[in-house]
Amino acid sequence: MFNRTLSALAATAVLVGGITTAQADTTLRGASMFDEEHAFTQTLREFERLVAENYEGDVTFDLRLNGELGVEKDYVTYLNQGVAVDYTILAPSNMAVFSDSIPLMDMPFLFRDLEHWNAVLSSDALAPLEADLREAAGIVIVGYHGGGVRNLASSEPITNMEELAGHRMRVMGAPIQAQTFSAVGAAPSAIAYNEVYNAIQTGVIAGFENEAASIQNLKFYEVAPHISLTQHTITVRPIVMSAKTFDALPADLQAAIMAAGAEAGAFGRALESGQDGQKLQAMADAGQIEVHDFLGREKMLELVQPVQDAYAAELGATELLERIRGM
């Protein structure tokens, strides 16, 4: 009788997804495309540390690095299905396959400067987008990383609006990305991230846009050594969890995760925004890149505002866009 009771108790403790047999033995599975030195990975390590520190139960983490579990678009599918990956950091554009509105937070020229960007991410301004993502994709935003300033990286110098005209460049998959760069005269294509290096090397495209950390980490400077300081985006990179995993956790662990996400996000934003200029300078000093000022950024801002307005109106997010602009 005693053994049968133990067996019954063990059976009722089994949960789904990334959660193992009992509350005292919870394992959460994470994914990063990068190594331990990358800001994404460091932020996820801080998230793990803070969750364990804030939670009275036992929780362990299994974070797989260097793209072992695929690329971001794979992570989005895993999170939605509640398999393989429980937590990670994602670009909003990669979640657009489920949520049309979520790329608005990563829209080019959305933030005036780092102070404006940090004020928005430290507030509840993006709550409507968070709610839409949870409902549409089954993904919970627990914090906000980011801070890389995205510039153009190309095989040849792009220093003004004339040289930008017709420039064949890779953009992320969300339509707003292609619409924005089309508006300023470029010829954007939504090419998979893991194909960018070869696409530039073979001449399919002439460049792309990204922040310094990724250019350095993945050695894109080998094929795109010219960096044009368009400074068109300050990145927003949500720290996310699968809703199927999150909802199956005990309430006190959920609370610990949300608190840790907010704190780890602030840690990551400070880390990445501080590293961005340093990484650009390090690559320049090593002769890996040549940095160019871009003449005509004011014209770019003028051309993209109607695109932003139309996109927000299509999503029913005009009020949200105006709130962000007004902060």
Image (cartoon, rainbow, N blue to C red):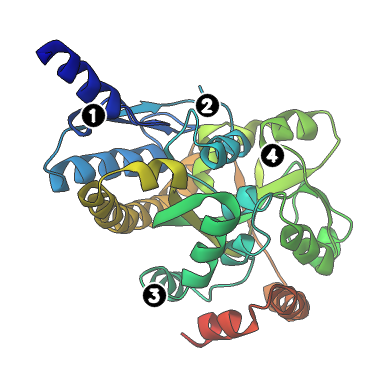
Name the residue type under label 4: Ala
Residue 298 percent location from the top left of the image: 69, 78
Callouts 4 and 3 close, C-beta under 8 Å: no
Asked whether disc 3 touches disc 1, contact meaning CB atoms under 8 Å apart, the reply is: no
Q: Nearer the viewer, residue 15 or 211?
A: 15
User: Disc 1 or 2, which lies upstream in sequence?
Assistant: 1
Give residue 12's position: percent from left, percent from top: 28, 28
Q: CA distance from mark 4 to mark 3?
A: 33 Å
- Residue beneath disc 4: 224
Query: Secondary structure under badge 2?
Result: loop
Q: Is residue 118 left or right of residue 71?
A: left
Q: Give me the disc on residue 22.
A: 1
Upstream in sequence: badge 2 or badge 3: 2
Of the residues tagged 3 and 1, which is closer to the observer?
1
Task: Name, please, the residue furthest toward the right.
Answer: 166
State whether residue 103 is above or below residue 125.
above
Along the viewing direction, whichever of 119 and 298 lies nearer the viewer? 119
Q: CA distance from mark 4 to mark 1?
A: 50 Å
**Is residue 287 among the parts visible in the rendering?**
no
Residue 121 shows in this picture: yes
What whole-number distance in Å separates the C-alpha atoms at marks 2 and 4? 22 Å
Indicate the amino acid at tag 3. Ala
Q: Amino acid at mark 1?
A: Ala
Q: Quadrant of residue 78?
A: top right
**Disc number lying in front (4 or 3):** 3
- Read off the residue under disc 2: 67
Q: Is residue 194 above or below residue 146?
A: above
Instruction: Label 4: state its secondary structure.
Output: loop
